[in-house]
């Protein structure tokens, strides 16, 4: 074991911590390291409990950061801590805030960041796995900039193990800033019903093949009938048909449902990395050569605007 | 209102991609402007137009033997471009690239720096914030809307749950999503004008940077072919597509078998 101390950047949810944070803590523990968590927010007690069940021995708690965009205050504060404590590696969730924190830490500590990581191997050094070209190949890489290795890990890369019984020691950390900061003036939360996209057992996603924004209703209805969540390709999020929170893929959510139904999605690399871990993949697309068929267990070459209404009618008839 | 947009020429993502013997992305074919950058150029042009004064300039790093992609961004309305092109930068990691771009941008005094959230070839997505940190600037990432009010930039920033309205004092850096604006098309007049707009090619020593501090410090150890999931059954819809899907959902037990 060459890597003895691993820190995990843990993102608070308000009352607990994100699932990806739990995945990273669990993996750090599996690697046999001494695990510490770094987090912020107003619910330090809850965070301390959550990180302890995933094996963290310490929680460095930055406390309330107010309305500052997290990276602007978390990164300089963590950089100061890292200089004093010298962990071997810092694992960071590949969320919007996680990537920003990693970027600022990288510049502050003058070490590169290993991004889009989906696996870790312990050898003489910690080796990172990075899927490329839509996941058809995996790059094995390593930083040689010295400690700490900054590693940004994609969601759903590791299994959560939250059965540890120890208590995490909570260490209060002084906040630092090194630049002028950006401030959050207002937060807008979209209403959603049904299971969360990243946790749903069934995901039905729509793409350009739907033809227009109104046809996305077919995707939502099919998802509802199957007890699942509706998702989307980047193309239709960029086109403004559905909000970003629906996006599956490289820059959206990573999903691993039992069933993924891709409706009118061609299968761009950007999309496939976010859903290829599904147990079963069904694709409906007009183009018989669409890349999505290459990873589908069941494909229908046809127009989603005729196949989906028929499928919805068939499911309604059964219920 | 002077805006610098970071842009990148990349291999056409619709053509097959490969790695060379040194595990670098093969860039020997035709390079095009990363489509993700066209949104940043458009945002910058609109902000300058709204301000009524100022200009949009471009900075880039990479091979400058073919600058067609950069010219296509100039054709949209950017007035000049600087490209850092230096053989010592081949395979540079994101932090190294950020150091180089920071040195180029430091020669100007932009009010705002605009980047894509990530490039469409390397997609590390950390460069913009590394750049902001090196320049000591606030950064607002994943913008779906960007406006300037007085001496502040006001941004709608995508979040998992919706969006946040975020403000930062200028000068600042923003990264924009592809949904932020609909990029304009180059006009014939713009394309003609772009031919005479200056493109400055800069080397590492021109920037006064120490090349020994710019070596990439990430090693690719090897490449493995991932276990691929084979394609399964595929049917051409003959009016029975929906029924076939229902049968498949029964087979995988997402639906109970018919008659049960």
Image: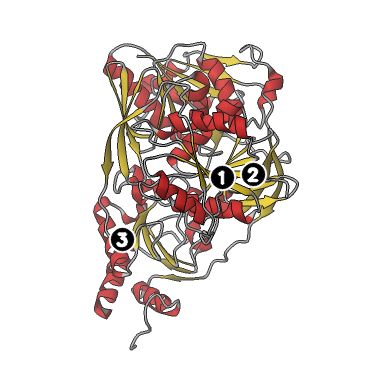
- Closer to the camera in the image, A302 or B219: B219
Residue A138 visible to the viewer: yes
**What is the number of the mark on residue A36?**
1
Q: Is residue B52 left or right of residue A84?
A: left
Residue B126 at least partly seen: no
Question: Residue, x 35% and y 27% (percent of image)?
Answer: B43
Residue B188 in which image quadrant: top left
Q: Residues within 10 Å of mark 1 (few under 14, many from 20)?
A: many
- Identified at 60% across, 51% down, the residue is A28
**Mark 2 touches mark 3? (CB < 8 Å):** no
> Mark 1 and 2 residues: CB-CB less than 8 Å, in contact?
yes
Q: Position of residue B143 (x, y in %)?
A: 36, 33
Where's the C terminus of chain A, which quadrant?
A: bottom left
| Residue sitting at x 50%, y 13% | B198
Q: Position of residue B197 (x, y in %)?
A: 47, 14
Q: Is residue B109 left or right of residue B90?
A: left
**Which residue, given by chain and number where applicable, does mark 2 sit on?**
A5
Of callouts 3 and 1, the N-terminal one: 1
Q: In what element is the residue under mark 1?
A: strand
Image spot of residue A103 (x, y percent): 52, 32
Q: Residues within 10 Å of mark 3 (few under 14, many from 20)?
A: many
Residue B41 figure quarter: top left
- Which mark identifies residue A219? 3
Residue A144 percent across, percent down from the top left: 70, 35
In this view of the protein, which residue sits in the foreground, B46 or A57?
Answer: A57
Residue A259 vertical position relative to residue B164 in the rendered view, above or below = below
Q: Earlier in the sequence, mark 2 or mark 3?
A: 2
Same chain letter for marks 3 and 1: yes
> Residue visible at 66% across and 13% down?
B205
């Amino acid at each position: 074991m060459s890597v003895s101390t691993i820190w995990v950047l843990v993102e608070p949810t308000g009352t607990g911590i994100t699932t990806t944070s739990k995945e990273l803590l669990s993996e750090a523990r599996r690697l046999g390291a001494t695990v510490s968590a770094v987090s912020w927010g107003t619910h330090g007690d809850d965070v301390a409990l959550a990180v302890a069940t995933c094996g963290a021995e310490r929680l460095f708690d930055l406390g309330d950061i107010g309305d500052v965009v997290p990276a602007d205050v978390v990164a300089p504060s963590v950089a100061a801590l890292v200089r004093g404590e010298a962990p071997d590696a810092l694992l960071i969730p590949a969320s919007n805030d996680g990537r920003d924190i990693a970027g600022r830490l990288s510049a502050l500590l003058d070490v590169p960041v290993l991004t889009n990581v989906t696996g870790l191997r312990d050898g003489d050094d910690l080796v990172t796995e990075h899927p490329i070209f839509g996941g058809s190949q995996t790059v094995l890489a390593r930083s040689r900039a010295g400690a700490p290795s900054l590693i940004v890990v994609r969601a759903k890369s590791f299994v959560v193990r939250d059965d540890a019984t120890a208590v995490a020691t909570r260490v209060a950390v002084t906040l630092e800033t090194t630049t002028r900061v950006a401030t959050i003036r207002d937060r807008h939360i979209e209403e959603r019903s049904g299971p969360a996209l990243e946790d749903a057992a069934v995901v039905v996603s729509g793409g350009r093949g739907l033809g227009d924004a109104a046809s996305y209703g077919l995707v939502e209805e099919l998802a509802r009938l199957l007890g699942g969540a509706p998702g989307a390709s980047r193309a239709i999020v960029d086109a403004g048909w559905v909000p970003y929170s629906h996006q599956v893929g490289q820059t959206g959510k990573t999903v691993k449902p039992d069933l993924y139904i891709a409706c009118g999605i061609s299968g761009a690399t950007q999309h496939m990395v976010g859903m290829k871990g599904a147990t079963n993949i069904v694709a409906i697309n007009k183009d018989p050569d669409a890349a999505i068929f290459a990873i589908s267990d069941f494909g229908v070459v046809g127009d989603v605007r005729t196949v989906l209404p028929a499928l919805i009618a068939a499911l309604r008839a059964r219920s | 209102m002077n805006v610098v947009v970071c842009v990148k020429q990349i291999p056409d993502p619709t053509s097959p991609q490969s790695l060379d013997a040194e595990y670098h992305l093969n860039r020997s074919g035709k390079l095009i402007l990363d489509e993700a950058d066209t949104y940043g150029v458009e945002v910058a042009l609109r902000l300058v137009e709204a301000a009524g004064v100022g200009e949009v300039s471009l900075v880039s790093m990479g091979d400058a033997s073919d600058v067609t992609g950069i010219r296509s961004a100039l054709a949209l309305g950017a007035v000049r471009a600087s490209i850092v092109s230096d053989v010592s930068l081949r395979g540079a990691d994101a932090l190294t690239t950020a150091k180089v771009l920071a040195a180029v941008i430091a020669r100007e005094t932009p009010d705002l720096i605009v980047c894509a959230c990530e490039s469409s070839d390397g997609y590390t997505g950390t460069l913009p914030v590394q750049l902001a940190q090196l320049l000591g600037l606030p950064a607002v990432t994943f913008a779906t809307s960007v406006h300037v009010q007085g001496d502040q930039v006001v941004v709608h920033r995508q979040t998992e749950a919706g969006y946040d309205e975020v403000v930062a004092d200028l000068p600042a850096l923003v990264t924009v999503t592809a949904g932020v604006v609909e990029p304009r098309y180059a006009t014939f007049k713009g394309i003609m004008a772009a031919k005479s707009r200056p493109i400055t090619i800069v080397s590492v020593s021109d920037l006064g940077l120490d090349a020994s501090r710019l070596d990439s410090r990430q090693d690719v150890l090897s490449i493995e072919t991932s276990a691929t999931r084979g394609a399964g059954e595929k049917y051409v819809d003959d009016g029975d597509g929906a029924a076939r899907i229902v049968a498949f959902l029964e087979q995988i037990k997402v639906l109970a078998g018919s008659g049960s």
